[in-house]
Image (cartoon, rainbow, N blue to C red):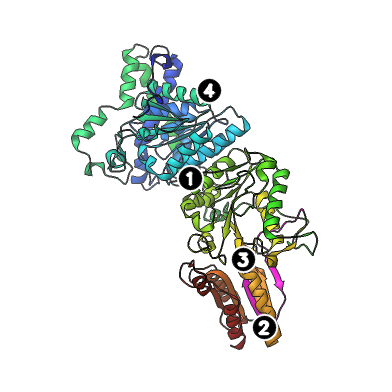
C-alpha cells in the first residue's frame, strides 16, 4: 500500500495567494511579467527566420503559472536557482531582463549567461546564483543537491531550486539526486513541470505512474506537493509552501506542476506530426495568460484599459531590448581560448617540483594520506567523500583516507551512495556555494568504475568555458588506476587516454610518493577541476618510496627527468616509470648506451618543452605507458614529436603499451596484456639499433 502522508494538496490554510487577497501592485507585476514573457516567447522564432540567431528555442507557453512562481520565491544572491531550457518566464520572474533574454537568445558577447558560448534558451545570471546549466536535461538536479549540502553545512538561510520537465525525471541521475537529498535531508526544491510530453514521446511511455512525482512517494524525508502549473495563484501557494517546508523541516520537497505545452517542443519540432487538431485546440483553450487576464478583469480589480497599458509598455520594452540586442557585439574568434582552464596555484618554494632529498622517506599511500590531512588543516572549507570512504577504522578500500573522519568529523569526511554521478555531480554543486571551498572525491572505487560519472565529468570540463569564466568547479577527482594487481576487468584499467581528450580539465599521474604529495597539494589549492590518477600497484611498493617535505608542491605541466641520458629518450608516467628506469639501467650495463627517462607526471597540461628538448638531444624517442597503444595518450606525444622535431629524429618514434584488449583477471592473461620490463627493453634495444 502506498503511503499517502507525503502527498500534499493545497488546503485552505495554504492559500496565501488568491485573487482577492493579493495586492493590486503584485498582480500588476505578475501580469507584466507574464505578458513580457509571452511576447518574447512568440518573438524568439522570428530571429531564426531572419537568420539572426536563437536557433534553439523551447516555448514555455502553458507553463506560465509555475514559472512565474519559481522566479517570485527565488531570492537573488541568497537562494540558488537551476532553471532548465524552457524556463524563460522563470528567468524573467527572477529578475533577468528582456534585454538579457534576447542577448542570450541571439548569442551575443554581452549575454550574462555565457557570452554566446552556450546554447540559446539556457538562461542564467551567475552573479545572482541563477546557474548556467547543461543541455543534458535534468543533470543540474545533482548540482542543486550539492549546493544544498553547502547551504546546510554553513547554516545559510537559503534553498536550492531545481527546475525540469517531467520526462527528464526518467534519467538515472535524477533518482540519484533525489535519493541523496532525502538521505542527507537537504534544503532543495525539485520542480517538475509536467506538460505530458518528452519532445514527441507521451508521458505514458516514460513511466507507469500518471504523475512523475508519484515515483518518489516512498522516499523518506521527502515531501511532495501537487499544483496546477497553469494557475499563478495555485503555483505561488505551492512554491511558498515548498520553501516553508524546506526551511522548517530541513528536508527536500518535490513540486509537481501540471502544465500544458501549447507549442512544439522546440523550433526544430513539428508537433502537428503527433498531435491532432482537437488536442491543439484544447490546449490553446487552457492558455494561462488569457485565463489570468480574464480573472483580473472579471474580478473588477483591473479594467481592460489598465491591462492594455501594461501590454503596450511591455511591447515597448521588448522593442527597446531588441534594438540593444541587434546592435550588441558578437563574440570574437580570439575569445575561444579564454576560460578553458583556470590558472593554477603556483608554488614559489618548489618551482621545479623537486625535493632535492629533503624530508623523511614515505610510501606513496602514506604521502597521499598525510597530504590530505595537511590540506584539511590548511583550509577548513575542504571536504572529501566517496564510496567506502570512512567507516570506523577503515578509510577507503586502500586506506588512503584512513583516520580522516576521526580528525575532521563526519560533516567533512563521509561516505557517498554507490552512485558515481552523484559523487561527482554534488561536488560540482557544492563548490558553487563559495570560491573558498575545495572538494576531493573518490570518483569511483577503481578508475574502471568511473564511467557512470562521465556525464558529470564532462560538466566539470566545460563549466568554466561555458559560463564565460563566471564559475569553475574547484574539485579534485581521485581515481585508483591501473593494473599489476591481478584485478581483471573493472579493477585494472587505466583511463587517461579517454580523459585527456576533453579540454578544460587537468590530468595528473604521479609515480612516486613525493610527486603524489606535491601534485595533490597543488591540485587541492588550485581553482578548477583536476583528475588525480593514482597507480594503485605502487601504493605500498618500496620502489615508489621517496623523501617528502611537509609542504612539498609540484607544479602542473612540469615533467621530471628521472635519469639523464644522450642516446635515447623514454617518455613515460605512472606504473611504467619504475620499469623504464630499470630498463635504462640495464641498457647501460649491457649495451653501454645512455637512456634519458622523462616522467611526465602531468598529462594535461603537458610539458612539451621537456619532451622536445630531450628528443632533440638524444634523437630517439620511446613512449611507454600502461594504457593501450592504440588510442592511448602516447599517440599525442608521438604526434607532437613528429610535428615539432622530426628533423632531429634518427629513428621512428616507437611506443610500448598494453595490447588492444581488456585486462584479464588470471595473472597469465594480465602478464600477456600489460607492458613489462622485458617488452620495454626489447623495444628500446630495437630502437637503439635502428
Give the distance between the C-alpha atoms of the residues marked 4 and 1, in whole angstroms. Answer: 42 Å
Q: Dot 3, crowdedness within 10 Å: few (<14), some or many (≥20)?
A: many
As drawn, 367 above or below 649: above
As drawn, 273 above or below 596: above
Secondary structure beneath dot 4 equals helix
Q: Dot 4, crowdedness within 10 Å: few (<14), some or many (≥20)?
A: few
Which comes before the other along the chain, label 2 or label 4?
4
Asked if marks 3 and 4 touch (Cβ < 8 Å), the reply is no
Which residue carries the number 1 mark? Answer: 108
Q: Residue at x 46, y 67 (%)?
A: 662
Give the distance between the C-alpha atoms of the residues marked 2 and 4, in whole angstroms. Answer: 71 Å
Q: Nearer the viewer, residue 360 or 470?
A: 360
Give the distance between the C-alpha atoms of the residues marked 2 and 1, in whole angstroms. Answer: 60 Å
Which comes before the other along the chain, label 3 or label 4?
4
Secondary structure beneath dot 3 equals loop
Task: Using residue 620 as the reference point, say whether residue 108 is left or right of it.
Answer: left
Which residue carries the number 2 mark? Answer: 587
Q: Nearer the viewer, residue 337 or 425?
A: 425
Residue 510 appears at what percent x and percent y? 65, 62
Give the distance between the C-alpha atoms of the residues marked 3 and 2, in whole angstroms. Answer: 21 Å
Which residue carries the number 4 mark? Answer: 248
Q: Give residue 574's mark.
A: 3
Q: In which quarter of the view is residue 25 placed? A: top left
In the picture, which quadrant includes the N terminus? top left
Q: Residue at x 64, y 42 (%)?
A: 437
As drawn, 67 above or below 589: above
Please check the rendered image and state whether residue 348 is part of the magenta-colored stretch, yes or no: no
Which comes before the other along the chain, label 2 or label 1?
1
Q: Dot 2, crowdedness within 10 Å: few (<14), some or many (≥20)?
A: some
Which comes before the other along the chain, label 4 or label 1?
1
Residue 382 appears at what percent x and percent y? 65, 43
Amino acid at each position: 500500500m502506498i503511503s499517502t502522508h507525503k502527498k500534499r494538496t493545497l488546503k485552505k490554510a495554504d492559500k496565501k495567494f488568491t485573487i482577492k487577497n493579493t495586492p493590486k501592485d503584485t498582480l500588476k507585476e505578475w501580469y507584466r511579467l507574464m505578458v513580457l514573457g509571452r511576447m518574447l516567447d512568440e518573438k524568439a522564432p522570428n530571429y531564426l527566420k531572419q537568420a539572426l540567431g536563437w536557433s534553439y528555442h523551447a516555448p514555455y507557453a502553458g507553463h506560465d503559472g509555475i514559472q512565474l512562481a519559481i522566479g517570485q520565491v527565488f531570492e537573488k544572491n541568497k537562494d540558488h536557482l537551476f532553471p532548465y531550457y524552457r524556463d524563460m518566464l522563470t528567468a524573467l520572474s527572477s529578475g533577468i531582463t528582456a534585454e538579457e533574454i534576447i542577448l542570450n537568445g541571439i548569442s551575443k558577447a554581452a549575454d550574462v549567461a555565457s557570452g554566446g558560448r552556450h546554447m540559446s534558451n539556457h538562461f542564467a545570471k551567475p552573479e545572482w546564483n541563477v546557474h548556467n546549466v547543461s543541455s543534458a536535461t535534468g543533470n543540474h538536479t545533482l548540482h542543486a543537491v550539492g549546493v544544498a549540502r553547502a547551504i546546510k553545512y554553513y547554516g545559510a538561510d537559503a534553498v536550492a531550486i531545481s527546475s525540469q520537465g517531467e520526462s527528464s525525471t526518467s534519467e538515472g541521475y535524477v533518482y540519484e539526486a533525489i535519493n541523496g537529498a532525502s538521505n542527507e535531508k537537504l534544503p532543495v526544491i525539485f520542480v517538475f513541470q509536467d506538460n505530458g510530453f518528452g519532445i514527441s514521446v507521451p508521458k505514458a511511455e516514460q513511466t507507469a505512474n500518471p504523475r512523475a512525482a508519484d515515483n518518489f512517494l516512498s522516499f523518506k524525508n521527502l515531501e511532495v506537493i501537487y499544483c496546477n502549473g497553469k494557475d499563478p495563484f495555485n503555483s505561488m501557494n505551492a512554491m511558498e509552501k515548498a520553501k516553508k517546508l524546506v526551511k522548517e523541516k530541513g528536508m527536500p520537497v518535490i513540486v509537481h506542476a501540471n502544465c500544458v505545452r501549447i507549442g512544439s517542443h522546440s523550433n526544430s519540432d513539428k508537433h502537428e506530426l503527433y498531435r491532432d487538431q482537437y488536442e491543439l485546440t484544447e490546449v490553446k483553450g487552457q492558455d494561462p495568460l488569457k485565463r489570468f487576464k480574464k480573472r483580473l478583469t472579471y474580478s473588477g480589480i483591473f479594467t481592460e484599459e489598465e491591462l492594455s497599458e501594461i501590454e503596450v509598455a511591455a511591447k515597448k520594452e521588448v522593442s527597446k531590448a531588441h534594438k540593444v540586442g541587434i546592435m550588441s557585439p558578437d563574440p570574437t574568434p580570439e575569445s575561444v581560448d579564454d576560460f578553458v582552464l583556470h590558472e593554477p596555484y603556483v608554488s614559489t618554494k618548489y618551482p621545479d617540483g623537486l625535493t632535492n632529498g629533503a624530508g623523511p622517506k614515505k610510501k606513496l599511500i602514506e604521502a597521499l594520506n598525510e597530504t590530505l590531512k595537511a590540506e584539511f588543516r590548511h583550509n577548513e572549507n575542504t571536504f572529501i567523500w566517496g564510496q567506502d570512504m570512512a567507516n570506523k577504522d577503515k578509510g577507503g578500500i586502500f586506506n588512503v583516507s584512513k583516520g580522516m573522519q576521526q580528525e575532521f568529523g563526519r560533516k567533512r569526511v563521509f561516505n557517498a551512495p554507490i552512485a558515481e554521478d552523484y559523487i561527482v555531480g554534488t561536488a560540482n554543486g557544492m563548490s558553487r556555494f563559495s570560491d573558498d571551498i575545495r572538494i576531493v572525491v573518490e570518483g569511483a572505487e577503481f578508475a574502471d568504475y568511473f564511467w557512470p560519472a562521465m556525464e558529470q565529468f564532462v560538466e566539470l570540463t566545460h563549466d568554466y568555458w561555458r559560463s564565460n569564466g563566471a564559475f569553475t568547479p574547484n574539485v579534485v577527482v581521485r581515481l585508483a588506476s591501473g593494473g599489476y594487481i591481478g584485478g581483471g576487468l573493472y579493477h585494472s584499467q587505466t583511463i587517461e587516454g579517454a580523459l585527456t581528450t576533453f579540454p578544460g580539465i587537468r590530468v595528473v599521474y604521479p609515480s612516486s610518493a613525493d610527486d603524489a604529495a606535491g601534485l595533490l597539494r597543488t591540485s587541492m589549492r588550485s581553482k578548477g577541476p583536476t583528475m588525480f590518477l593514482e597507480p594503485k600497484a605502487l601504493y605500498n611498493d618500496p620502489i615508489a618510496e621517496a623523501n617528502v617535505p611537509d609542504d612539498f608542491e609540484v607544479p602542473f605541466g612540469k615533467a621530471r627527468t628521472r635519469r639523464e641520458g644522450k642516446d635515447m629518450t623514454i617518455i613515460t608516467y605512472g606504473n611504467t616509470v619504475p620499469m623504464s628506469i630499470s630498463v635504462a639501467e640495464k641498457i647501460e650495463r649491457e649495451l653501454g648506451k645512455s637512456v634519458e627517462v622523462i616522467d611526465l607526471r602531468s598529462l594535461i597540461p603537458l610539458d612539451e618543452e621537456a619532451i622536445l628538448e630531450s628528443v632533440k638531444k638524444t634523437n630517439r624517442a620511446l613512449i611507454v605507458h600502461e594504457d593501450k597503444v592504440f588510442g592511448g595518450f602516447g599517440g599525442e606525444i608521438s604526434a607532437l614529436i613528429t610535428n615539432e622535431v622530426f628533423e632531429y629524429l634518427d629513428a621512428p618514434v616507437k611506443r610500448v603499451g598494453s595490447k588492444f584488449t581488456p585486462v584479464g583477471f588470471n595473472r597469465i592473461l594480465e602478464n600477456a596484456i600489460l607492458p613489462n620490463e622485458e617488452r620495454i627493453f626489447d623495444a628500446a634495444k630495437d630502437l637503439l639499433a635502428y
